[in-house]
Amino acid sequence: MPSKVLIAEDEARMREVIIMLLSDMPLEFVEAADGRQAIDAFDQETFSLVITDLKLPGPNGMEVLKAIKAKDPEVPVIVNTAFGSIDNAVKAIRAGAFDYVTKPFKEERLRGCVEKALQLSRLTSQVRYLRQEIESEYHFDKIIGHSPQICDILRLAGEVARTDATVLVTGESGTGKELISRAIHFNSERADGPFQPVNCAAIPATLLEAELFGHEQGAFTGAVRRQTGKFEISSGGTLFLDEIGDMSLDVQAKLLRVLEDCTFQRLGGSKFIRADVRIIAATNKDLMTMVHKGQFRQDLYYRINVFPIAMPPLREHRDDIALLADAFVAKFSHALGRKTPQLTATALQRLTAHCWTGNVRELKNVIERAMILCRGSQITSKHLVLHEPDAPPLDKADLDKVVAVLMDNGGINLADLEIRLVKRAMQLADNNVSRAARLLGLTRPTLRYRLEKLGLDGAGQPVRS
Ligand SMILES: Nc1ncnc2c1ncn2[C@@H]1O[C@H](COP(=O)(O)OP(=O)(O)OP(=O)(O)O)[C@@H](O)[C@H]1O
Ligand SMILES: [Mg+2]
């Protein structure tokens, strides 16, 4: 498609010369004979480039330039000026013109200038397109769920997006902590600025400080040149401190200072730099427990916990599973260029009953795999590869504490305890005996035998006689 160029020149002969000099380029020209016509034409159509004379009747070239920049600052404007009036050209550049050419036109100069301006225009529209893509990817309506839990989260996120408040997003792995954090950023006033994630767990403590605050040349062995830190890079945007529970106490102290003073210094530097960032922190750890154990600074905890958002585990909003599964089937079908298969009722039932320890990420992966295995128009139960989790290894110290609580208060009835443990396992496993057996470290037949022996039915309830 040819790029549209607006030419504002009062002399028809000059417009002809410009068009002739650019005639072999893939361009479409719109001509304006005075400033008014130029501004009106710009209002009605979209242009990749404007070439305007500075001396125009009606609003002059400078006023045309200003009107265009006010409407769309990204469209490049080349100004033409008579030889010898460079002062005006300089003023135009200061007012936002891309470049200037002097009359009489030199073919090479004009063509070179137009080519560069069009290149800029193409890059700008590509950036604009990509930005829109990213923004729409992280729009709140891309966060799927109609359960009360997800509706609450979206309401909270929408409210906090309008402010600059620090947000703490908590939740198990795969619940969508990063997704909601990005959505908050892209719906905030900082959306045009960067969203800069830093994974505090993946960077060794010794390097994290330099990563966050940057360093001067020679600040430490190996600091061969100055490096800008994430606080500076994300200026005007959002700094996403992922896995903040894994940050060392040392770095926590330094982070606290920045949050309190809103300024920081590069390592080895003396200058104080203003931190113009919004902080969103995320963790799958229980920070309050870490505070009690002395692993997380209490003062920092209160600093970052200004606006908490707790992402629920998927097993606590099972009514969203079908919606999420359908959305992922549609997404992967689109990506694979295939017709969207349907999930059968039994497949959906299995998905709804699964325990989803890996939450939405696990569901997404299960669907992606099913899409590869399924060739026809239906995703059936046999396409779903669901891993039942094993019982997590018990922390010996924790177990000793539980035993002490039970025994030190006058002892306990062992048979009663066994019944309670079995009942609880059956409840957690949604009455699935295999899964409950795994939670108890037993085989399925052994649990069946025990259920019978304890007088419990398949749902872990006492058998009525
Ligand atoms: N409600 C949702 N709607 C659509 N996609 C979701 C939703 N929740 C999570 N996802 C998707 O699930 C995947 C995991 O989400 P995300 O990375 O945000 O999780 P997380 O909580 O940051 O996990 P981790 O703690 O492991 O880093 C991503 O692909 C994300 O797009
Ligand atoms: Mg994450």
Image (spheres, rainbow, N blue to C red):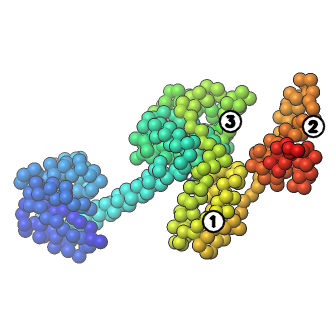
Q: Is residue 46 left or right of residue 309?
A: left
Task: Give the residue at mark 2.
Answer: 415
In this rendering, would 173 be left or right of 439? left
Residue 5 on image: x %, y %: 21, 64
- Disc 3 to disc 2, how far (Cα)? 33 Å
Q: On residue 235, which mark appears?
A: none
Judging depth in this view, the residue of 222 and 241 nearest the camera is 241
Name the residue at the top extreme. 409
Q: Residues within 10 Å of mark 3 (few under 14, many from 20)?
A: few
Q: Which residue is at 24% across, 61% downward? A: 47
Q: Which mark is residue 344?
A: 1
Amino acid marked by disc 2:
Ala
Q: Is residue 4 above or below residue 124?
A: below
Name the residue that disc number 3 marks: 286
Residue drawn at 47 percent across, 54 percent down: 137
Q: Amino acid at mark 1?
A: Thr
Residue at the image position 53 percent from the left and 40 percent from the top: 152
Q: Amino acid at mark 3?
A: Asp
Tell me the CA gap for discs 3 and 1. 38 Å
